[in-house]
Amino acid sequence: MGLSLIERVILTARQVGIDELVIVIGYLGEKIKEKLGNGNRYGVKIAYIENKEWEKGNGVSVLKAKKSLNENFVLLMSDHIFDDRILKELINYDTKSSVVLAIDRRKPLLGDTKVLEKEGRKIADIGKNIEESNCIDTGIFLCSPKIFHYIEETVKEGKTELAHGIAKAAKNKDAKIFDITQIESYASKMRKEIKPWWIDIDTEKDLIKAKEMIIENSSKNPSDALAYYVHKPIENKLVAFISNWPITPNQLTIMVNILAYTATALFFFGYLLPASILTFVVGIADGLDGKLARVKLKSSKLGSLEHSFDLLFEFSWFIALSWFLFGSTQSVIPLILCIFIILFIAFYRHIYDQFRRAMGKSLDDAGDFERIFRRIAGRRNLYNIPILVGILLGVPLYSLIFILFHSGITAIVYSERAMKHMYVMDHKKI
């Protein structure tokens, strides 16, 4: 998806506020340094430590960083990519142990490092070949400098894997687990459940699986039926294709807006059919910039303004179409319809946004009724359909009438359901 594995690790760390990294290099280390540099272009500072004994176990690599780390630190594998929520929760974990290991409860696969934990927190044993286990190692650790003591002891014994050092700490009751399955899986901004995910990439098959995971977990749950059944699969394929291009999400946003206002101009000058067809193209393209940002770990505060600009060009379509109809019929009815359409859409969009801010979840996921209604609720994608039908039938004015009633019903339903859920929540607090 346009990023090396280690770049994904770096950018994921940066997303949770980690901006200083120490990378232990060995085999082809100079190529890694040349690729990553000092970290400026990733928004972090990178220092390098060379391990000339890289053919030994990874515990030796960890030990090389001992002199550089005199406070608590996060230890990550450069070929494990993972959900940033895991790291966010882990770095806020309160512990006095030498190491806290993020574990997963899924069944171990070939090559996984297995873990036996007891009492819900303590590590009893760890290793690829242990007989009894109930979870697996994700390769994500929160460590104190004490961990170096245990690794030094095991290296002296000829055991050079990191797991050996953690096992030593565990025997001393100085190693705990952090269960990633306990992390809240509902992602409000994505409007869906996303279980905390991670993957250790060892093979090309793992790469393919990782790509699928990244795309799926970067895809919002579309609200309307057209976006859910048509746009989403097309967007996923397009994002997978363009992610290797040298194009940024913000550049893509600009391109989408150019297309959108081209449609506005076509409506204004009476080229209704090509304008209507172009709105469907915009509908698909509009989902690419945000998804590309999430896939390439380039989400930004600036990018959050995209929805405001989307609303602006959506309104411009109604205004341009109604103005053309006004000019061609000399009737003010299209303008009146347009005014009320914009009022209704602005109202229910504001209700929708306020509900998420106040309740911490999308109104679309507030209940069973809302999950069904969202497929037919007023959305730009669905409004494009009656506009096209009206144009093809030669009655574009009826498109505006239909949209007026659709947006009005959506406004009534959204306001009623939002008030109901917020009222219940207010009285629960009391």
Image (cartoon, rainbow, N blue to C red):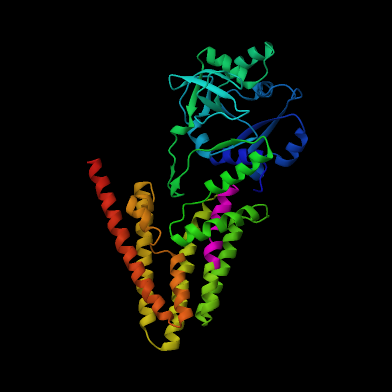
Q: Position of residue 132 (x, y in %)?
A: 53, 18
Name the image quarter holding the C terminus: top left
**Front residue of this view, candidates 253 and 168:** 168
Whether residue 315 is situated above or below residue 228 in the rendered picture: below
Q: Is residue 295 magenta?
A: yes
Residue 148 visible within the image: no
Write down the quadrant of residue 31 in the picture: top right
Q: Is residue 324 magenta?
A: no
Residue 387 visible within the image: yes
Q: Position of residue 429 (x, y in %)?
A: 25, 41
**Front residue of this view, candidates 134 and 4:** 134
How many callouts does the rendering have?
Answer: 0
**Front residue of this view, candidates 286 and 133:** 133
Whether residue 148 is situated above or below residue 302 in the rendered picture: above
Whether residue 251 is situated above or below residue 157 in the rendered picture: below
Whether residue 195 is situated above or below residue 120 in the rendered picture: below
Q: Position of residue 162 (x, y in %)?
A: 63, 21
Q: Is residue 7 left or right of residue 274?
A: right
Numbered range of the magenta stretch:
281-298
Q: Is residue 159 left or right of residue 326?
A: right
Q: Position of residue 390 (x, y in %)?
A: 44, 78
Would you say the magenta stretch is mainly helix, strand or loop?
A: helix
